[in-house]
Image (tube, rainbow, N blue to C red):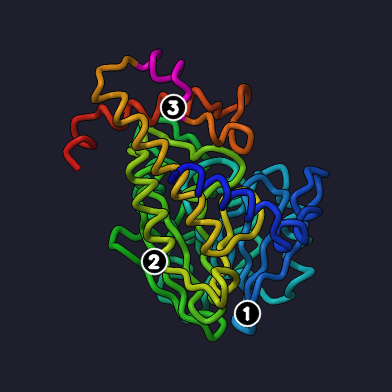
Amino acid sequence: MKAIAVILGIIAALSSPLLHAQGNQNSADGEIHVLPVQGNVYMLVGAGGNITVQAGDDGVLLVDSGLASMSDKVLAAIHSISNRPLIYIVNTDESNDHTGGNAKIAATGKPVPFDNLTGPGRGGAEGAFIIASENTFERMSAPTGQVAPTPEDAWPNDTYSTPQKKLYFNGEPIQIMRQPANTDGNSIVLFRKSDVVSAGDLFDLSGYPFIDLKAGGSIQAIIEGLNRLIDLTTVRAHAEGGTMVIPGHGRLCDQADVVVYQQMVSIVRDRIQDMIKNGMTLEQVKAAKPTADWDPLYGKTSGRWTTDMFVEAAYKSLTDKKESRK
């Protein structure tokens, strides 16, 4: 019955006016589409991962920078919103579709003039600050003597290892919160006055959640992150509106959409856990199709992240001794 209820919730969400109003913004036409969200916040679609823009008198803050190949179009879209300087880029994780534009886009910005880390204090670095969790920085850079996976001018230059980092920018409190999910270094960003959360790949409507086992991700961490996202959001009326949620990929959402997605991931987790307890192997679990109810919506048989890859990653994270003790 629980699965049926979730499916009905998905159908309701798919038929909502909010989804249809944004259909054009999600077209893969090689262009960047600008969607005003609420308050000082906008959503850019079409650059790879979704990009969040907060703009005001103090300047511009981005959450993620998209693919490197889309940087010129991203900059044009930003300039259509504001002619103020770019001050901050926040990276929600290290994946290329969220950080690829770091170097080119950050170079167009300028550091906060009153910050004592500018100029020589930042190693002579210029341009916008790039904020990320310490784990994200470590994966984008490399130990001395090794080749880094990303160029140095794309690395975060303002990292944090505490549970959260706070900014006050454009008259708005902003909380950048570390939230392990598909890696152990994900960040989510809450714009408190605008009432918008930028979730990154913790919440990805384009398919089943990506779980990077090598980077410390797990299905349990994703569920815990989605639970936190639900806690951070508030509905306006009749389970709709209120806090808006910008996912890593896909359309603009609200709390009800996050709840439906969280229930889907939780049910798949429970099914796989039960199969593991019954002694089923990975191949047997795949054959049992624990995701079958949602495959028409999220399933993929080709590309960088297929349904089989998701099931395998979920299975392996649930059989990991550290995860099984949680």
Q: Is-magenta flag for residue 34?
A: no
Secondary structure of the residue carrying tag 3 is helix
The type of residue carrying mark 1 is Gly
- Residue at which label 1 appears: 39
Depth check: 209 or 182 in front? 209
Was residue 283 drawn as part of the magenta stretch in this picture?
yes
> Residue type at mark 2?
Asp
In whole angstroms, how far apart are the C-alphas of marks 1 and 3?
Answer: 39 Å
For label 1, the SS is loop
Front-lying residue, 38 or 96: 38
Front residue of 258/90: it is 258
Front position among marks 1 and 2: 2
Q: Which residue is mark 3?
A: 311
Q: Residue at x 45, y 60 (%)?
A: 188
Q: Amino acid at mark 3?
A: Val
Q: Please give the residue where the numbered disc 2 appears in the rendered image.
A: 231
What's the residue at 23%, 37% (across, down)?
Answer: 323
- Name the residue at 37% across, 37% down: 269
Give the spatial CA distance, label 1 vs label 2: 20 Å
Instruction: First in sequence, mark 1 or 3: give its number.
Output: 1
Image position of 26 (left or right of 235): right
Q: Position of residue 193 (x, y in %)?
A: 52, 82
Where's the C terminus, which quadrant? top left
The overriding secondary structure of the stretch rendered in magenta is helix
Q: How dense is the environment of label 1, judged by Cα within 10 Å: few (below 14), some, or many (20 and up)?
A: some
The quadrant of the image that shows the N terminus is top left
Q: Which residues are magenta?
A: 282-290
* SS for dot 2: helix
- Give the CA distance from mark 3 to mark 2: 27 Å
Q: Nearer the viewer, mark 1 or mark 3?
A: 3
Q: Percent position (x, y) of residue 43?
A: 67, 63
